Amino acid sequence: MAVVIAHALLLSPRFSEGLAIVKSKVIVRTFPTDDPSLGYGASSLDVLGKYFGVLLQPIFVGVEKPFYWTLIALSLAAAALICTKSAKNRALGVAFFVSIAAPLSWFVLAKGHSFVHPFLNPVLWNVPTVLLGLVCVATLVSYFAKRAQPAAEAA
């Protein structure tokens, strides 16, 4: 909130005028306008299409694949955790799938901003979705390592 107040005061000596300018800028950048370059006429599916298919967001060094491949791999790890008998593992897997709503909601609700900034918005996946997904992968590896350990000791 302090940042909005400071921004308003920088834009105009009168706080109310500065706040009105901030509001108009937010509206232009988050909602469709008549300007085609700001996503006018683009559907939410068009905006999401920029993030699924075209977008490259390598989170692993040397992996140059579209982000949806990373999302699929993390989803498989989360789904595998949901299938375990551990309530904590199942909760973690469910939390991962719920976390997908966070970036998707921004892409849809701030369609104008998302349409214009496909190079900037991919960072929205990193917290919490990618972070939880990587925890799912580590937990799954640990789960299978613990299950394999007694079998190795018995042999």
Image: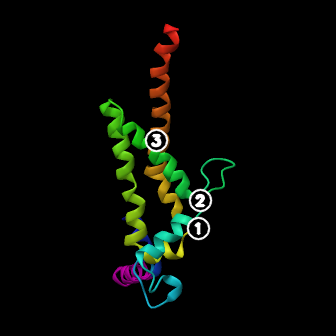
- Pointer 3 or 2: first along the chain: 2
**Render colour scheme:** rainbow
Numbered-mark total: 3
Instruction: Work out whether 122 lies above or below 82.
Output: below
Image quarter of the N terminus: bottom left
Q: Indicate whether residue 46 is drawn in magenta.
A: no
In the picture of the structure, the residue carrying the numbered disc 2 is 66
Q: Is mark 3 on a helix, strand or loop?
A: helix
- Kindly indicate whether the residue at mark 3 contacts the one at mark 1 (C-beta within 8 angstroms): no
Numbered mark located on residue 77 in the image? 3
Q: Where is residue 84 in the image (x, y as percent from the top left)?
A: 36, 32
Q: Which amino acid does label 3 sit on?
A: Ala
Q: Is mark 2 on a helix, strand or loop?
A: loop
CA separation in Å, label 3 and label 2: 18 Å
Name the outermost residue toward the left: 87
- Kindly indicate whether the residue at mark 1 contacts the one at mark 2 (C-beta within 8 angstroms): yes
Q: Where is residue 80 in the image (x, y as percent from the top left)?
A: 41, 39
Main SS class of the magenta portion in the image:
helix
Numbered mark located on residue 54 in the image? 1
Q: What stretch is highlighted in magenta?
A: 12-28
Name the outermost residue toward the front: 155
CA separation in Å, label 1 and label 3: 24 Å
Q: What residue type is labelled 2?
A: Pro
Crowd tier of the residue under label 2, counting other residues whose Cα lies within 10 Å: few below 14, some 14–19, many 20 or above = some
Residue 2 in view (yes/no): no
CA separation in Å, label 2 and label 1: 7 Å
- Pointer 1 or 3: first along the chain: 1
